[in-house]
Structures are given as structure tokens and as C-alpha cells.
Image: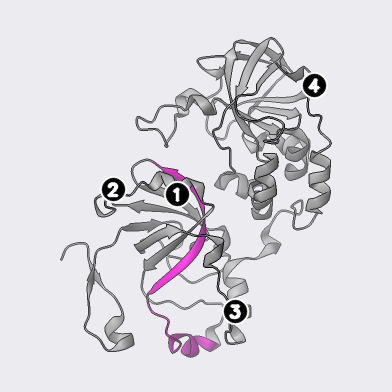
């Protein structure tokens, strides 16, 4: 039947072949399943909504990880060529599952994930949320040669930038961020994004209720998570803690690469600035929104995988290390050095 393929049941178990209809396909820059450092590979899952039985994919946003089952030609890891026969004889077929990070859920059945070791074009057979209670119970046993092979297969920490939480003390970094004041902070940096990957550092910025930071591409860029592609008002402004941004970036010159418009020396934690909190900065008034602000693939490429996981981990979420979203309530101007205070 169209859009189907045969699984490896006959070859593995001696049973009759069966036909399956994939839920979608994998898109990334890996032509096959060889190579290493899969932990850094970003993939897009293009799902066929007709085969999902009205499943609400938006509910997956509450989870940090998903389990993805894929079908592709059998290709053992190139990390252990001497053990290929052992790998082939150990029950490995073209169907495998991986637990990967869920980066975004887009409209039209598109999911962005990282750490899925599947080649471009692989078929998606299954998808579901991962919860901690699914972790194996009891000791995990495996052949000794697979430890080295799997380590190379997934992650090479040497490829990370030198200034990352894996190299520096994450606890010391958090302690530095927590030195930011709970109120009466400072606007340290204003960055306008006129186009994709473009940055303009401003001394003075104008905040508008209709366009956010005037001259920024927030409205023109729109959002892939809205039904009509329009920009989300609750994500009009992205604000990041200056101390955290400086630690992650390594130098002040690289801070604008984070992609936020405002960098402030202020405690952005949920306990201090819950959604609905209003902040006065310069002559403008803004409001913290519940829209989550998470690091994207570009953030990871620029600052490293460990930096991404540090700001988006349990503690990072609690302190909003990646930042917060806000909208403009009253227009006005804001300058570097202006006080930012609770209204």
C-alpha cells in the first residue's frame, strides 16, 4: 500500500512481514546513521496529521523529552567497526527508538528535536512523551565494547566552547546570577534585530505596544506556533539576565548573539517575577508574560550544548536563566543604564 514499508520481523523472528504506515519523516543534515556526536544533531519531524487521530501535539510542550521510534536501513555505529558482526547479531534491526530533547512544537505537525540518531529521510513510526519513571529499573547490562562506542556515538565534549558549564563551575555561575537585585535593577544592554542573525546594539531604544522594540524584526518574523503565522504578543520582548548572558557568552561582545532585546541586571526568577508582574524601565512599562523562553538550536551552536542544558534544566527554569518574555503595556524610551523596577 502507498506510504508503507515492511519491518524486519521476518528476518529477526521468522514471522510473516507486515505493512506499516509511517507517521512522518525525519529531516536533518545526516545522510546516514554513521558518524558521531549525535547529541548535537538537530532534526525536524514532519508528521502527517491525518495519521495522528486528532492527537493534540501541543500537549507535548509540557515535556522536555520525547521517545521517537524510527525505521531506516540497518547501519551500526561507525565507532566500533571491529564489532559490527556482534552488533548485527545482537538483535539490531532498522527499527530503533531514541529519547531526545524536544526543542519546539510548531504548527502543521512539525516538531524540532535534538539528539535523535536517525538519518535524513528515516520514517517516524511512533512518538510519545518521556517521563522519568520510564527509566530502566535494575542494573543495565551490555557488552563492554558498547560503552566506548556509545560514548563517541552520542557526544564529544571537546567540541563545546571552552566557556561552558562543563568546564566552569555551574554552581558558581548560579551564585553569580543570584547576586542580581530583586528590584531596582539596571538595563545593561539593548539589542535590536533588524533581520535574521543581525544585531544592532543601541544606546537608546523605543518601545511600542504594536512593534515591541522599534526597528526589531519581532512582528515581521512572525511565529511558527500561531495558526496564521503572526507574531505572538506574549513574546514581543525577550529579556535575559545580564550576568547569566555574560557567563554563557564568555565576553560582553558575544552577548548580543543570545538573541534577546534586553539584558538586565535583575532577578528574573519565577519567584521574583511571576507572569503578570509589571516593570518600569525608562519611560516605558512592560509586563512579564507566561510565554516560555527556551534556548534554540542557534543558542546551542553559539554557546555550547552544556550551556543550553544549564539554562534550560530544572534549576535553570526555576531561575529563568534563559530569560523571560514580556509585552509593552505603555510605550516609551529606554536607555542603557536606566533603572528597571517593579511597578
Q: Are marks 3 and 2 in contact (CB under 8 Å)?
A: no
Q: Earlier in the sequence, mark 3 or mark 4?
A: 3
250 sits to left or right of 291: right
Which of pointers 3 and 4 indicates the residue nearer the eye? 3
Percent from the top left, x then y, of residue 293? 58, 37
Counting from the top left corner in percent of width and height, residue 299 is at 61, 44
Helix, strand or loop at label 4? It is loop
Q: Which mark is residue 54?
A: 2
Is 87 colored magenta in this rendering?
yes
* The N terminus, quarter of image: bottom left
Measure the C-alpha gap from mark 3 to mark 2. Answer: 37 Å
The secondary element bearing badge 1 is classed as helix
Please tell me in which quadrant of the rendered image residue 216 appears. top right
Disc 3 element: loop
Residue depth check, mark 1 versus mark 3: number of the one nearer the observer: 3
Q: What element carries label 2?
A: loop
Mark seen at residue 138: 3
- Image quadrant holding the C terminus, namely top right
Compare marks 1 and 3 and give the one earlier in the sequence.
1
Q: Mark 4 points at which residue?
A: 184
- Whole-angstrom CA distance, mark 4 to mark 2, is 48 Å
- What is the span of residues highlighted in magenta in the rendered image? 83-106
Label 2 CA crowd tier, 10 Å (few <14, some 14–19, many 20+) = few
- Which residue lies under the disc numbered 1? 60
**Rendering colour mode:** one colour
Q: How far apart are marks 1 and 3 (CA)?
A: 28 Å
Q: Which of 176 and 212 is in front in this view?
A: 176
- Mark on residue 261? none
In the depicted structure, whether residue 233 falls above or below residue 207? below
Query: What's the CA distance linking mark 2 and mark 1?
Result: 14 Å
Q: Which of marks 2 and 1 is nearer the N terminus?
A: 2
Amino acid at each position: 500500500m502507498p506510504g508503507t514499508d515492511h519491518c524486519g520481523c521476518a528476518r529477526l523472528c521468522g514471522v510473516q512481514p507486515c505493512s506499516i504506515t509511517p507517521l512522518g519523516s525525519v529531516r536533518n543534515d545526516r545522510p546516514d546513521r554513521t558518524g558521531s556526536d549525535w547529541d548535537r544533531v538537530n532534526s525536524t519531524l514532519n508528521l502527517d496529521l491525518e495519521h495522528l487521530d486528532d492527537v493534540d501535539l501541543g500537549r507535548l510542550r509540557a515535556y522536555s523529552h520525547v521517545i521517537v521510534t524510527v525505521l531506516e536501513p540497518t547501519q551500526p555505529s561507525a565507532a566500533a567497526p571491529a564489532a559490527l558482526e556482534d552488533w548485527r547479531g545482537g538483535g539490531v534491526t532498522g527499527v530503533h527508538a531514541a529519547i531526545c530533547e524536544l526543542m519546539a512544537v510548531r504548527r502543521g505537525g512539525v516538531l524540532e528535536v535534538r539528539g535523535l540518531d536517525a538519518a535524513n529521510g528515516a520514517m517516524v513510526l511512533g512518538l510519545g512523551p518521556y517521563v522519568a519513571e520510564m527509566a530502566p529499573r535494575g542494573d543495565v547490562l551490555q557488552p563492554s565494547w558498547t560503552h566506548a562506542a556509545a560514548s563517541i556515538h552520542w557526544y564529544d565534549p571537546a567540541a563545546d566552547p571552552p566557556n561552558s558549564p562543563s568546564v566552569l563551575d555551574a554552581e558558581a555561575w548560579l551564585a553569580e546570577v543570584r547576586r542580581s537585585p530583586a528590584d531596582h535593577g539596571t538595563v545593561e544592554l539593548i539589542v535590536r534585530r533588524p533581520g535574521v542573525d543581525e544585531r544592532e546594539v543601541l544606546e537608546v531604544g523605543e518601545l511600542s505596544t504594536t512593534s515591541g522594540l522599534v526597528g526589531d524584526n519581532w512582528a515581521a518574523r512572525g511565529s511558527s506556533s500561531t495558526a496564521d503565522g503572526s507574531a505572538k504578543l506574549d513574546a514581543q520582548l525577550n529579556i535575559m539576565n545580564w550576568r547569566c548572558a555574560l557567563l554563557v557568552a564568555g565576553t560582553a561582545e558575544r552577548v548580543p548573539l543570545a538573541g534577546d532585546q534586553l539584558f538586565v541586571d535583575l532577578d528574573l526568577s519565577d519567584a521574583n517575577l511571576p507572569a503578570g508582574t509589571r516593570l518600569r524601565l525608562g519611560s516605558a512599562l512592560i509586563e512579564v508574560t507566561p510565554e516560555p523562553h527556551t534556548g534554540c538550536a542557534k543558542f546551542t551552536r553559539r554557546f555550547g550544548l552544556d550551556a543550553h542544558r544549564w539554562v534550560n534544566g530544572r534549576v535553570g527554569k526555576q531561575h529563568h536563566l534563559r530569560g523571560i518574555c514580556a509585552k509593552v503595556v505603555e510605550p516609551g524610551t529606554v536607555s542603557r543604564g536606566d533603572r528597571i523596577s517593579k511597578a
